[in-house]
Amino acid sequence: MADLRTPAILAIAALVAACSSPSSERISDAELAAIAPLKQQYSELVAGLEIRPATTLIVSVDLQNYIEADDARVAAMKREALARWRAAWAAQHPHGHAVLQVRFIDFIGRKVGDEKTSL
């Protein structure tokens, strides 16, 4: 009889854990909300933000403005994006470890640049 109860208990425990953990969609929404001020701070450069996959932040840039921008402004935006992404990801994944990436793309999805950090 104990043999039948053990799998049932494990199945119930897994179900409870799955129901109590936040969904990946809610986590992504919270991460994007934390990063959203980047779009306002660098409104001339940042056209959009997206998370895909779970450890990569995609920053769509206005390529014309990106090319014409001062190098210091672009570098500051990249640093800020990476710092915000790191803080947002860490807040939603306490004690988690990952290599986080920020990929900067143009309007047709070509990579313009990227930044990485380990957490």
Image: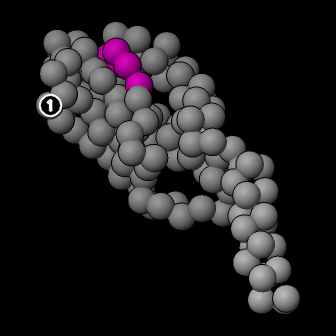
Rendered view: 64 above or below 94: above
Q: Quadrant of residue 105?
A: top left
Q: Going 78% across and 56% down the picture, which residue do you hit? A: 16
Magenta stretch, main secondary structure class: strand
User: Can residue 88 be seen by looking at this rendering?
Assistant: no
Q: Going 42% across and 59% down the picture, which residue do you hit? A: 99
* Image x and y of residue 62, in percent: 25, 15
* Image x and y of residue 14, in percent: 71, 64
Q: Looking at numbered disc 1 in the image, what kind of residue is underneath it?
A: Arg
- Quadrant of the snapshot with the N terminus: bottom right
Looking at the image, residue 59 sits to the left or right of residue 37; the answer is: left
Secondary structure found at label 1: loop
* Image x and y of residue 96, in percent: 60, 62
Rendered view: 75 above or below 6: above
According to the picture, the residue beneath numbered tag 1 turns out to be 110
Asked if the stretch drawn in magenta spans residue 48, the answer is yes
Question: Which residues lie in the magenta part?
Answer: 45-49
Closest to the observer, 11 or 43: 11
Instruction: Specify the farthest residue to the bottom.
Output: 2
* Image x and y of residue 102, in percent: 36, 41
Closest to the observer, 27 or 56: 27
User: Can residue 52 be seen by looking at this rendering?
Assistant: yes
Looking at the image, residue 105 sits to the left or right of residue 39; the answer is: left
Rendered view: 4 above or below 80: below
Q: Going 32% across and 46% down the picture, which residue do you hit? A: 115
Asked if the stretch drawn in magenta spans residue 42, the answer is no
Q: Quadrant of residue 77?
A: top left
Looking at the image, residue 9 sits to the left or right of residue 94; the answer is: right
Q: Residues within 10 Å of mark 1 (few under 14, many from 20)?
A: few
Q: Going 27% across and 43% down the picture, which residue do you hit? A: 114
